[in-house]
Amino acid sequence: MEKQHIYITRKIDDAVFAPYAEQFEIHMWEREEDPVPRDILLEAVKDADGLFCMLSDKIDEELLRHAPNLKVVSNLAVGYDNIDLDEAEKHGVIATNTPDVLTETTADLGFALLMATARRIVEANQYIKTNQWQNWAPYLLAGSDIHHKTIGIVGMGRIGEAIANRAKGFDMNILYHNRSRKPDAEQALEATYVSFDQLIREADFIVSVVPFTKETNKLFNQAAFEKMKSTAIFINISRGATVDEDALVEALKMNKIKAAGLDVFEVEPITNEHPLMQLENAVCIPHIGSASEETRTKMIQLCMDNIAGVLNGTGAKTAIQ
Ligand code: 8YV
């Protein structure tokens, strides 16, 4: 019997796939950093039964039309705004993602970004390495305290809760906003549910962990930044498109808010010509929320397990509901 085909849209260490090679025929785009060009992808999925993909791959009607044998798309991310779920369903394709395995790592990064931004770590690193440290001064690189401040978490899913857990360790007052209330989190983490409006007005740190949807498109817009405290620090580890970047640049430039820590951008990769890159009060990192070696290995493994499960008929571990 002919082996089923799996296509992988980035170069990933072959060793991961060795256990599956006997059972499946595996093809891979041979570059680690460049996404597979669309025309090559459309050609490659023609005889694919399983597709291992990532955020830079748009899984839409066009792609699904080109993939008559496709049974599963396995996204190397917990977010899946790159997948048209309705179209996948219409084409009988199961979509899977990688929840849970990346929760703690992404929360670590969120907190690292919050701390780096509050305590001006990036500026301080630059300061010392460019030999500017000639003297001590009382307010040299003075940042903002984190402990006992108010954190406002927008999106209280798994990662939001893991951030709240870290905030608890810093004796922070925890506010959250979510589509539905989370009584367990309220009890275990002493988190208080508030409206979005109250959260952005009262929080010292506003952390966006909200998935990107029609409703959250540019949720953080000019009106939202206007309502924040002038001392507020905005952290985004969800999706760039939840933010109106022009409004954010304006808010940072005019000191309407104090600083921002950003792991995600409207257009990725962002270039150094973007106005955000000129601002000292913006700490920017290249979408590395889940990028620890341990977690990426677990994500890749889970992606493969999901594909193999669907193709073997035992089912996906983490199908998107
Ligand atoms: C991904 C992410 O690793 O999981 C998500 O939704 O944004 C990251 O953890 C990254 O997007 C690569 O696909």
Image (spheres, rainbow, N blue to C red):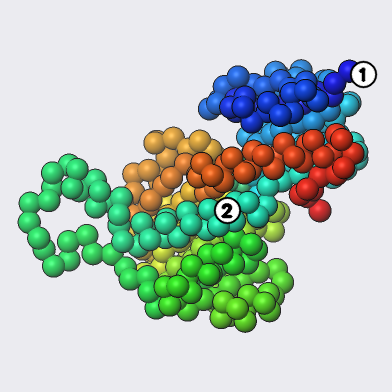
Residue placed under numbered mark 2 in the picture: 238
Quarter containing ligand 1? top right
Mark 1, secondary structure of its residue: loop
Q: Is residue 59 left or right of residue 285?
A: right
Residue 214 in view, yes or no: yes
Residue placed under numbered mark 1 in the picture: 1
Q: Position of residue 282 (x, y in %)?
A: 38, 52
Q: Is residue 234 positioned above or below 71 on the image?
A: below
The residue mark sitting in front, 1 or 2, is 1
Q: Position of residue 96 (x, y in %)?
A: 76, 44
User: Residue, x 58% and y 27% (percent of image)?
Assistant: 13
Q: Quadrant of the N terminus?
A: top right
Mark 2, secondary structure of its residue: loop
User: Cβ–Cβ below 8 Å for labels 1 and 2?
Assistant: no
Real-space Cα distance between discs 1 and 2? 43 Å
User: Residue, x 69% and y 43% (percent of image)?
Assistant: 302
Sequence-wise, the earlier of marks 1 and 2 is: 1
Q: Quick one: 40 or 26, which is closer to the camera? A: 26
Amino acid under label 1? Met
Amino acid under label 2? Ser
User: Residue, x 87% and y 35% (percent of image)?
Assistant: 312
Disc 2: CA contacts within 10 A as few (<14), some (14-19) or many (>=20): many
Q: Quick one: 108 or 153, which is closer to the camera? A: 108
**Residue at disc 2, CB closer than 8 Å to ligand 1:** no
**Residue at disc 1, CB closer than 8 Å to ligand 1:** no
